[in-house]
């Protein structure tokens, strides 16, 4: 297939490009580098199956070549208020990527009669009152809170996708992506994995905000991309959770990273310093992914973390 991937220079987008090319497809990557990095796709330079266009998806997109699939992954995704690439500092850009960017890419898919996949997020569930979270759960979201620019952009994006499917019969797919980790994560992402790994590699105590009892489920990027690829080729149009359902507390996760890095500095506790209504617990119900896609995560968290730790070690040495 001839495939457009927006957000191609991002963490997930770049891995997605690699997988699509490995499957024999031709990929056009699109990114404006507001959060993505040229380093993530520089290994694809000169690859005859990859072309790159620097463009903001919030602006009109015009193509002369026929597209067989459009995958919309362009959006700031980090809640880090201390990073210029975190969505608290890119509020309008985040809203535009999820609204205008989604409409623009849906229009391309409609024009080309192409498959379409929207990268949504577990954040559409907000701070969930139902656990684990099935796709049928409508969520518990603050529409005007500190996280609203991201949460509501993705919720609007899902509504737009379903509208184009119902009205224009576009072959659409929605992936609700849960916490994912692996190589090419940004050093200033601000979430638990990069924060903990960097502190551990510096021999510092890992900072736990609150008591560490809040939970997450971490999926290795290769598993996530496998689920995305299967969803793209499926006939399923309603949202599908893609992530790991192995739940762990933040404290236990920190201890695992300390053990793998042989960091003896332990942990320190700080008052909670989270953005808005940070979810206390997060774990997907993967029944639909298992049933419809025959997919579930395979990579053990310690194996994935060892690869990720080595990536961060190399990046920190070069910084």
Image (tube, rainbow, N blue to C red):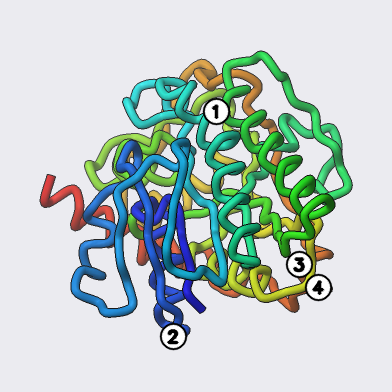
Q: Quadrant of residue 141?
A: top right
Instruction: Give percent across and percent down for residue 216.
Output: 62, 45
Q: Position of residue 196 (x, y in %)?
A: 39, 42
Residue to which mark 1 is pinned? 95
Mark 1 or 4: the one toward you: 1
The answer for how far apart the CA atoms under marks 1 and 4 are is 31 Å
Whether label 1 touches label 4, CB < 8 Å: no
**Label at residue 289:** 3
Depth order, front residue of 184/167: 167
Q: Residue at x 56, y 23 (%)?
A: 210
- Can residue 264 be seen here? The reply is no
Q: Is residue 10 left or right of residue 99?
A: left
Q: CA distance from mark 4 to mark 3?
A: 5 Å
Q: Are marks 4 and 3 in contact (CB under 8 Å)?
A: yes
79 up-or-down from 24: above or below? above
Q: In terms of sequence position, does the residue under pointer 2 or pointer 1 come before the other?
A: 2
Find residue 44 and report its horizontal and vertical position in percent: 26, 70
Question: Between residues 26 and 241, which one lies in front from this camera angle?
Answer: 26
Residue in view at x 83 percent, y 43 percent: 131
Crowding near the residue tagged with mark 1, few <14, some 14–19, many ≥20 C-alpha atoms within 10 Å: many
Q: Which mark is residue 292?
A: 4
Contact between marks 2 and 4 (CB within 8 A): the answer is no
Residue 170 appears left or right of 114? right
């Amino acid at each position: 297939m001839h495939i457009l991937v927006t957000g191609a220079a991002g963490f997930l987008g770049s891995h997605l490009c690699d997988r699509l090319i490995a499957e024999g497809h031709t990929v056009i990557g699109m990114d404006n580098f507001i959060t993505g990095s040229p380093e993530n796709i520089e290994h694809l330079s000169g690859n005859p199956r990859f072309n790159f266009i620097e463009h903001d998806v919030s602006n009109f997109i015009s193509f002369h070549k026929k597209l067989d699939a459009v995958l919309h992954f362009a959006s700031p995704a980090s809640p880090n208020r201390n990073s210029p690439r975190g969505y608290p500092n890119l509020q309008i850009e985040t809203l535009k990527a999820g609204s205008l960017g989604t409409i623009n890419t849906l229009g391309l898919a409609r024009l080309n009669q192409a498959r379409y996949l929207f990268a949504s997020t577990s954040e559409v569930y907000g701070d969930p009152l139902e656990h684990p979270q099935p796709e049928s759960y409508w969520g518990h979201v603050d529409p005007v809170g500190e996280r609203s620019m991201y949460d509501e952009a993705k919720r609007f994006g899902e509504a737009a996708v379903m509208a184009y499917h119902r009205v224009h019969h576009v072959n659409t797919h929605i992936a609700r992506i849960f916490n994912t980790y692996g190589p090419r994560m940004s050093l200033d992402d601000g979430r638990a994995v990069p924060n903990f790994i960097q502190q551990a590699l510096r021999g510092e105590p890992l900072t736990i905000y609150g008591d560490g009892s809040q939970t997450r489920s971490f999926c290795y990027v290769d598993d996530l991309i496998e689920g995305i690829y299967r969803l793209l080729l499926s006939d399923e149009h309603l949202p599908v959770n893609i992530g790991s359902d192995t739940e762990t507390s933040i404290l236990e996760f920190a201890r695992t990273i300390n053990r793998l890095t042989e960091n003896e500095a332990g942990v320190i506790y700080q008052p909670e310093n989270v953005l808005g209504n940070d979810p206390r617990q997060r774990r997907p119900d993967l029944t639909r992914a298992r049933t419809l896609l025959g997919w579930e995560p395979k990579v053990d968290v310690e194996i994935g973390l060892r690869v990720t730790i080595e990536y961060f070690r190399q990046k920190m040495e070069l910084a």
